[in-house]
Amino acid sequence: MNHILQVDSVELEFKDRKVLSDVYLRCATNEIIGLLGRNGEGKTCLMNIILGNLKASNSFVSFDGIKTMDAFRQPALIRYLPQFNFIPPGLKLYQVFKDFCLNYTHFESKFPELGMANDSLVKQLSGGQRRLLEIYIITKSNTKFVLMDEPFTHLNPIQIDHVKLFLKEEKANKGMIITDHMYNHILDISDQVYLLASGKVHLTNTKFDLERLGYINRVANQKNQLRKNYFYIHCNSMYI
């Protein structure tokens, strides 16, 4: 059965600043929806509004046409991959898979680079390994929709390629909304891409669209500034 998540008329303000204004997006089973935007444009806020963790001044979130205000209470409906690690570090891998009713052997077949026994502790994993585990757990869970916030963080290029292939396979079973600053990967795997800019949402599908709306240049400027800050700190530290 095809399921539809629809988000409409989202308005969000913090004090005197309007973060989101009349935002709309739609995600269906067998779709990966990309969500791009600069830091502070409201991507994570929008995901939390969909979940019901954040109350907007106005919003309409529906699943299969039914308005839902507390989706976070319904894991069979939607699950969320946050930017931070959410699996307790003291758990053993087999316990994690048991809790989510998933098969560790299948996980190993998809991500053989993990190379950890199923009685290993989560805290023994590297940052990339831990992210792979979390992505798999959320994506394979018994749910209709998945929200992912910065899934490619901490992953190396090989891991990213494996994750992208995995997500493309799994979208047959659920709808996915993914946000990440690595826009090339988002463009590569998404069926539709929405860009948040100045509180508004724009439907985009190519780098040309992102350039036209100023997103790519702004990202490049942010990276250049980070490099300048790094060299400034590094050079000055030599004389401290």
Image (cartoon, grey):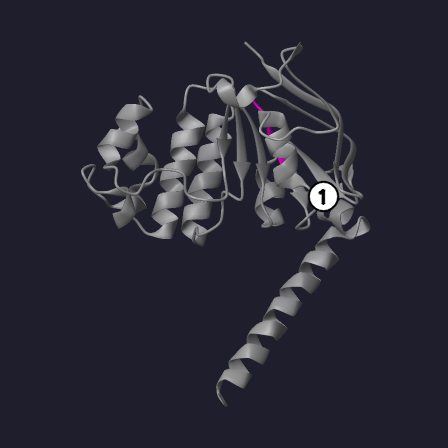
Specify few, some or many for label 1: CA neighbours under 10 Å numbering under 14, 14-19, or 20 or more.
some
Q: Is residue 8 magenta?
A: no
In the picture, measured across the screen, residue 100 lies left or right of residue 231, that is left
Residue beneath disc 1: 206
184 sits to left or right of 209: left
SS at badge 1: loop
Magenta-colored span: 30-34
The answer to which of 153 and 113 lies nearer the viewer is 153
Q: Give the percent coordinates (x, y) of residue 69.
A: 62, 18
Q: Position of residue 108 (x, y in %)?
A: 28, 36
Is any atom of residue 186 visible in this view? yes
Residue at far bottom of view = 239
Q: Is residue 32 magenta?
A: yes
Q: Main secondary structure of the magenta part?
A: strand
**The quarter of the displayed image where residue 97 is located:** top left
The residue nearer to you, when weighing 236 against 151, is: 236
> Does 105 sit above or below residue 237?
above
Residue at the image position 47 percent from the left and 29 percent from the top: 169
Q: Position of residue 7 (x, y in %)?
A: 69, 23
Q: Amino acid at mark 1?
A: Thr
Image vertical order of residue 42 relative to residue 219, above or below: above
